[in-house]
Every structure is written in structure tokens, then in C-alpha cells.
Amino acid sequence: MHTDSNCIFCKIVAGQIPSRKVYEDDELLAFHDIAPWAPVHVLIIPKVHIASMVDVAEAHAALLGRMMVLSARLMRELGVTNGYRHVINTGRDGMQEVPHLHLHVMGGPRPWSKG
Ligand code: 5GP
Ligand code: ZN
């Protein structure tokens, strides 16, 4: 699997940086964001290093679909019953800070600190 030894999320996948995991399988990892904007703020990432949506290809379609399906399951399991937001930031103008594709999923009672 393609990984990037300098990438913080690849290091989380490899267990070199700790995270509060909520889900893991062969292809995907989900963990709590270290600086949450909302009462529940989970990041869902592919284990393979894809830098951003710019690098997504047709071959990744099922993987991205699985990220979306997993998001609904995790919000249900985490007790988020009144709706949630999905965010994917892409590139500099998209305010992406970590160059490893990730889906933010945020929910819980408002007000939230951002968004
Ligand atoms: P971006 O701006 O790239 O879409 O979002 C990156 C997110 O990753 C931010 O919400 C940030 O708080 C989170 N983040 C950055 N470093 C770490 C880390 O080491 N652990 C965890 N759990 N989240 C991180
Ligand atoms: Zn990576």
C-alpha cells in the first residue's frame, strides 16, 4: 500500500502517532479530531496515502463510497441523532492543512466552535 513516511495521517495509520480510533478495517481508519469543532468530530481516512481530492481517480470510487457509508454508521454509533456535517478540504485555497485525504464528520448539539 502506498504510504508517505512524512505524512502525519500515515503515521497515525502505522500507529507511530496515537489517536482515539473509532473504526478500523483493511482500507479505512476513523478517529477523533485532535481539535474538534463540534461535540463529535471524526476524521475518516483511507489507509492508502492519497494526498487530496485532486489525486482521486476512478479506481478510488468504491473507497470514497465506503467512507461516506461509514460516516453514517459512525454517527449512529456515536449517538449523533440530530444531523451532522461532512467537510473535505482540498488544497491551499480549500484550507487543507493535512495532505492526506480525510473526511470530516461533525455533529452534536450546537453551538459549535466553528462552522
Ligand atoms: P484539514 O484542515 O486538513 O481539512 O484538517 C486537518 C484536521 O486534522 C484538523 O481538524 C486537525 O485538528 C486534525 N489533526 C491534525 N493533526 C492531528 C493529529 O495528530 N491527530 C488528530 N487526531 N487530528 C489531527
Ligand atoms: Zn498519508
Image (spheres, rainbow, N blue to C red):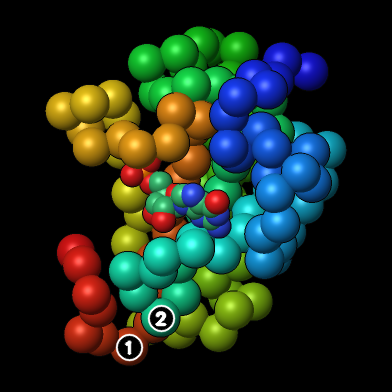
* Residue 97 position within the rendered picture, expressed as x and y whole percent measured from the top left: 35, 37
Write the residue at 21% across / 33% down.
94
Query: Which quadrant holds the C terminus?
Result: bottom left
Q: Is residue 61 visible?
A: no
Give the farthest residue toward the right: 26
Q: Residue 109 carries which label?
A: 1
Write the residue at 46% across / 75% down.
40
Counting every numbered tag in the picture gives 2
Q: What residue type is labelled 2?
A: Pro
Q: Which amino acid does label 1 sit on?
A: Pro
| 114 displayed left or right of 81 | left
* 34 to 17, vertically: above or below: below
Write the residue at 76% across / 44% down.
16
Residue 9 occupies which quadrant of the picture? top right
Q: Name the residue under label 2.
A: 39
Element type at mark 1: loop
* Residue 112 position within the rendered picture, expressed as x and y whole percent measured from the top left: 24, 78
Mark 1 vs 2, N-terminal side: 2
> Do the residues bearing badges 1 and 2 touch, measured as CB atoms within 8 Å?
yes
